[in-house]
Image (spheres, rainbow, N blue to C red):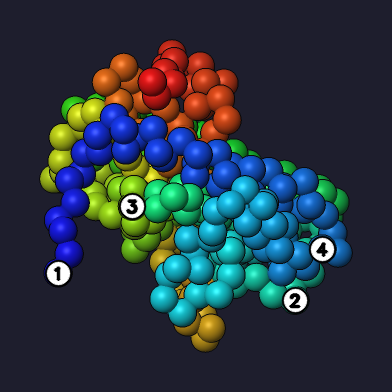
Amino acid sequence: MGLRRSLYKTPAQLRTMVEPGLITAASLDAVRALVAPGVTTEELDAAASAVIRGRGAESNFMLVRGYRHTTCISINDQVVHGIPGSRVLEPGDIVSIDSGAQFQGWNGDSAITVVVPGGDPAVATARQRLSDVTEGSLWAGIAALASARRVGEIGDAVQSSIEAQGSYGILRDYVGHGIGRAMHEGPTVFNYRVPDLGPEVKPGLCLAIEPMVTGGTDVTFVEDDDWTVSTVDGSDGAHWEHSVAVHESGIWVLTSPDGGASALAPFGVTPVPIA
Ligand code: MG
Ligand code: MG
C-alpha cells in the first residue's frame, strides 16, 4: 500500500531536507557537550530531545514502532541501538549516539562516537582510534559518493578505508539507507563491497551512510532488551553517520553545518550548498 517513492527527490524536496539535517546535527552537538563521567545516558537523551523539540521538530526515532526515546546510545561492546536509561558514563567509555529529527515531514539521521575523558590511557587511545577509523571511513564513503556512478561504490570506499587502518570488524547485518519522508527508505547502503552495485547515483538521491565498526569481530547479537546490538566477543564498537544529498551541482552533507567541507577537503571534494 502507499505510493512508491522515487529514489530521487526533486530540488524542492532536497531543500526541505536541509532543516531537519541541521536540527539533527544540533541535537548531537548538545549531547557531545554533555559527555562526561557520571552523566547518565537518559540525561544525554533528554538534551537531544530538548534541542529537537525546541526547534519545532520531533524525534523520528520515537516514530519507530515501540521505541520511546530520542536517541540510541551504545557503550563499549554495544555497537548500535542501545536504549538510554540509568547507565552512568565511566571514564574511558566509548559512547555512540544516534539521533534523528523530523521537521515538516522530512527527516535527518546522524550518529557520532565520543570517548569519555579519563580512564586507562591505553584503552582510551585504542577506543579513540576505533572511533577515528570509523569516522574516517564514513568520510571516505561520502567522498566516494561525490563521483560515484552507483551506490555500491560507497561500500567499497568504506571497506577500503577501514582495511587500510588495520584489523577491524565491519558489521554486515546493519547498513545505511535512503532517507526522505521516511527515516528509512531505499536503497540499502552497504558498508562493504557487494557484487551488485545497486542504483545509479543521480541528482535527488539522499542517503544515510553509517559505518558500524568493531575492534574485533563483525558478529553481533541482540540483547534481552530486544534492541541493543552487542559484539559476541566483547570488543568495542563505534558508529558514525551522516545524511547526504546529491544534487545538480554536487553533494551536500545535510547533517553537518558546513555541508562536510572541512572533513571532505583532504579528499579533494568540495560540497556545494543546495540552491
Ligand atoms: Mg541513525
Ligand atoms: Mg540511519
Name the residue that disc number 4 marks. 39
Question: Does 198 appear above or below 250?
Answer: below
Question: Does 267 appear above or below 153?
Answer: above
Question: Hey, what amino acid is under mark 1?
Answer: Met
In contact (CB < 8 Å): disc 2 and disc 4: no
Residue 274 rendering spot, x and y as whole percentages = 39, 24
Q: Could you tell me how far apart the alpha carbons at marks 1 and 3 are, in whole angstroms?
A: 16 Å
Name the residue that disc number 3 marks. 181
In depth, the one of 252 and 88 nearer the eye is 252
Name the residue that disc number 2 marks. 86
Answer few, some or many: residues within 10 Å of disc 1's Cα (few below 14, many 20 plus, some between 14 and 19).
Answer: few
Q: Could you tell me how far apart the alpha carbons at marks 3 and 4 are, in whole angstroms?
A: 34 Å
In contact (CB < 8 Å): disc 1 and disc 4: no
Residue 173 rendering spot, x and y as whole percentages = 34, 63
Residue 177 visible in the displayed image: no
In depth, the one of 124 and 45 nearer the eye is 45
| Distance from mark 1 CB to nearest ligand 2 atom below 8 Å | no
Q: Secondary structure at mark 1?
A: loop
Q: Could you tell me how far apart the alpha carbons at marks 1 and 4 are, in whole angstroms?
A: 44 Å
Question: Does 96 appear above or below 154?
Answer: below
Residue 82 rendering spot, x and y as whole percentages = 57, 69
Question: Hey, what amino acid is under mark 3?
Answer: Arg
Q: Could you tell me how far apart the alpha carbons at marks 2 and 1 are, in whole angstroms?
A: 40 Å
First-in-chain label (3 vs 2): 2
First-in-chain label (1 vs 3): 1
First-in-chain label (2 vs 4): 4
Answer few, some or many: residues within 10 Å of disc 3's Cα (few below 14, many 20 plus, some between 14 and 19).
Answer: some
Name the residue that disc number 1 marks. 1
Q: Quadrant of ligand 2?
A: bottom left
Q: Nearer the viewer, mark 1 or mark 4?
A: 1
Q: Is 100 placed left or right of 210 in the picture?
A: right
First-in-chain label (3 vs 4): 4
